[in-house]
Amino acid sequence: WVLLFCSGTLLAAGTYAGFTWGVLATAALIALFGFTGGLVLNDYVDRDLDRMDVDHRLTRYWRPFGTRPLAEGTVSPARARLVMLLLALGAAALILTLPWPHNLYILTIMGWSYLAEYAYQIGKRRQRYPFAQIVGRTDFALFPVAGYLVLGLPDATALLYFVFFYPYALAHLGANDIADITNDRARGLKTIPVLYGMTGAARWVLIFALLHAVAAILFAAVLGPIARVGLVAGLVCVMVASIGLLRHPEESAGLRLLSLFHLAMALYAVVIVIDYVV
């Protein structure tokens, strides 16, 4: 996630002045504090629902220690609130060291992202249509854009990064929901496979993967040659995973193929970084 944020910063550095390694370090810390604060917010809001989990495979996949401290009672809600507040304040303090209006842009995105994450966690508990997902995943798509705005302005490149990444975020969400369907049913959440069935969720993934591929054509126009090669490699991962889920819309396939989405995201970020360095 830090790499994804910094890929936006380095993409902007190719167009805008002001890049230093100190700026990049600041961007990395903003990403680390801001994203970790979002993770704590996620766990805080869902702490009661997470106690209903019956399948812990995805928890072990996402978390190095394979635990949910709030749900398990090893961390109190009050302590979690304090940690979340400190992380958010740390990110905000670092953002305020950036020049105007970049600090305003990123603070606005951070505020929106926390609000969208909260709305997503609450909204998916009781809905007939996937509005919570559509709004909530804007936080994911805005993350590299916030990195871009450390040096850049809200220009066409920033918009293209968002347009490129937003369909990916929705495709990834569908794949993650397929992989976690047992727990989501136990929690009573209205996720994509709960709303539309496993086949419907697999179609959701493929539709947004195809939109992601179309957006990649536009985004490639503002990237260098190395980044374009990585873009193609990442798209191959996304399409292989999406087609695999359509052929086998099952929880086990979701767990197996989800890593391809994360590999794609890593490729996108790494090649943009390499493109700038080289």
Image (cartoon, rainbow, N blue to C red):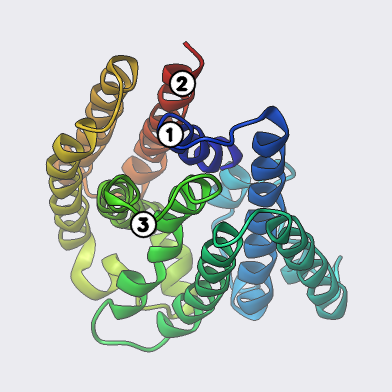
Q: Is residue 165 above or below residue 133?
A: above
Mark 3 and mark 1 in contact? Answer it, CB < 8 Å.
no
Q: Which residue is mark 1?
A: 11
Q: Position of residue 232 (x, y in %)?
A: 23, 24
At numbered mark 2, what does the secondary structure look like: helix, strand or loop?
helix
Q: Which residue is mark 2?
A: 276
Which of disc 1 and disc 2 is earlier in sequence?
1
Q: Quadrant of the N terminus?
A: top right
The Cα–Cα distance between marks 2 and 3, rounded to whole angstroms, is: 29 Å
Instruction: Please identify the quarter of the rendering in which residue 215 is found.
Output: top left
Q: Which residue is mark 3?
A: 173
Mark 2 and mark 3 in contact? Answer it, CB < 8 Å.
no
Mark 2 and mark 1 in contact? Answer it, CB < 8 Å.
yes
Which of disc 1 and disc 3 is earlier in sequence?
1
Say left or right for 153 vs 214. right
Which residue is pictured at 36% across the width and 38% down the height? Answer: 261
Identify the amino acid type marked 2.
Tyr
Q: Is residue 54 above or below residue 239?
A: below
At numbered mark 3, what does the secondary structure look like: helix, strand or loop?
helix
Say left or right for 180 vs 159. right
Which of disc 3 and disc 2 is earlier in sequence?
3
